Amino acid sequence: MYLTSNAMQETPDTTEEAITLIAKGTLDPKRAPQLLDQIFDAPDYLTVLRNYPEAQQYMDGLYKVYCFYFCK
């Protein structure tokens, strides 16, 4: 399992914090849709992602969230 009680409590203040939360792979998948909407709607999303050093980890985290819902 890839969630922790700590991650469930975290509320990111910036787009980078939200991306980091997903990249860590500890995001509660039930919170993921709300957080993903917040990230994708952020005007700085592409800029932050382009400068984010762990972009592959972020993509892996997105895949985990996706699989939580669709890979059954």
Image: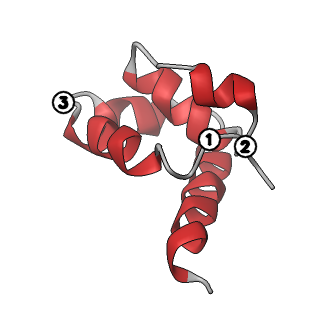
For the N terminus, the quadrant is bottom right
Q: Residue at x 59, y 65 (%)?
A: 63
Which disc number belongs to residue 27?
A: 1
At which x and y percent is residue 21? Answer: 59, 32
Q: Cβ–Cβ below 8 Å for labels 2 and 1?
A: yes
Q: In this image, 69 relative to 4: left or right? A: left
As helix, strand or loop, the secondary structure at mark 3 comes to loop
- What distance separates the C-alpha of mark 3 from that of mark 2? 27 Å
The C terminus, quarter of image:
bottom right
Name the kind of residue labelled 1 in the image. Leu
Q: Give the residue pinned by disc 2.
A: 3
**Image marks 3 and 2: residues in contact by CB distance under 8 Å:** no
Q: Amino acid at mark 3?
A: Pro
Furthest residue in direction right, as rendered: 1
- The residue that mark 3 highlights is 43
- Of the pair 17 and 71, the residue shown nearer to us: 71
Q: Quadrant of residue 15?
A: top left
Amino acid type of the residue tagged 2 in the rendering: Leu
Query: Where is 58 relative to 45, above or below?
Result: below
Label 2 residue SS? loop
